[in-house]
């Protein structure tokens, strides 16, 4: 293993830990931004901050918090129903005012 790769790995209590840069290379990300964001949000289990440096277990995974159960579909349906009711109420109000003015 090259010296450059070795500097991003640590063995602590029998586990292999990596810096953010080493973990980025290990999982194949192009930048460290997504990893740093996940660290700040606590979505990488086992990661520890020592001073200003994060160390991440080699086998850690980034927890996905995206909605995958269709919640957005339900929200869109509710918004669409509200929009229709609002349009119908406005149309009825305009029709009522039109009939009064005749």
Image (cartoon, rainbow, N blue to C red):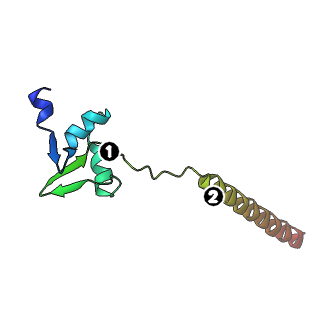
Classify 10 Å Cα crowding around label 2: few (below 14), some (14-19), many (20 and above). few
Determine the secondary structure under disc 1: helix
Residue denoted by label 1: 34
For discs 2 and 1, the disc positioned in front in the rendered view: 1
- Name the image quarter holding residue 31: top left
**Taking 65 as reference, is 39 left or right?**
left
Q: Which mark is residue 21?
A: none
**Taking 72 as reference, is 34 left or right?**
left
Residue denoted by label 2: 75
Residue found at x 31% / y 51%: 37
Task: Give x and y (percent) for residue 96.
Answer: 85, 70
Along the line of sight, the residue nearer the viewer: 93 or 84: 84
Against 97, is 65 above or below?
Answer: above
The extreme left residue here reads 3
What whole-number distance in Å separates the C-alpha atoms at marks 2 and 1?
A: 27 Å
- Rendered-image quadrant of the N terminus: top left
Residue found at x 15% / y 43%: 10
The extreme bottom residue here reads 100
Residue found at x 11% / y 30%: 4
Task: Give x and y (percent) for residue 66.
Answer: 48, 51
Residue found at x 64% / y 52%: 73
**Taking 41 as reference, is 14 left or right?**
left
């Amino acid at each position: 293993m090259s010296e450059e790769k070795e500097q991003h790995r640590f063995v602590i209590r029998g586990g292999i830990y990596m810096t953010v840069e080493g973990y980025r290379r290990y999982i194949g990300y192009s930048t460290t931004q997504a990893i740093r964001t996940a660290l700040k949000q606590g979505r990488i289990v086992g990661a520890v901050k020592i001073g200003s440096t994060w160390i991440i277990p080699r086998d850690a995974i980034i927890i996905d918090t995206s909605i995958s159960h269709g919640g957005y579909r339900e929200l869109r349906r509710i918004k669409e129903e509200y929009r229709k009711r609002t349009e119908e109420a406005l149309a009825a109000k305009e029709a009522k005012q039109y009939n009064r003015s005749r």
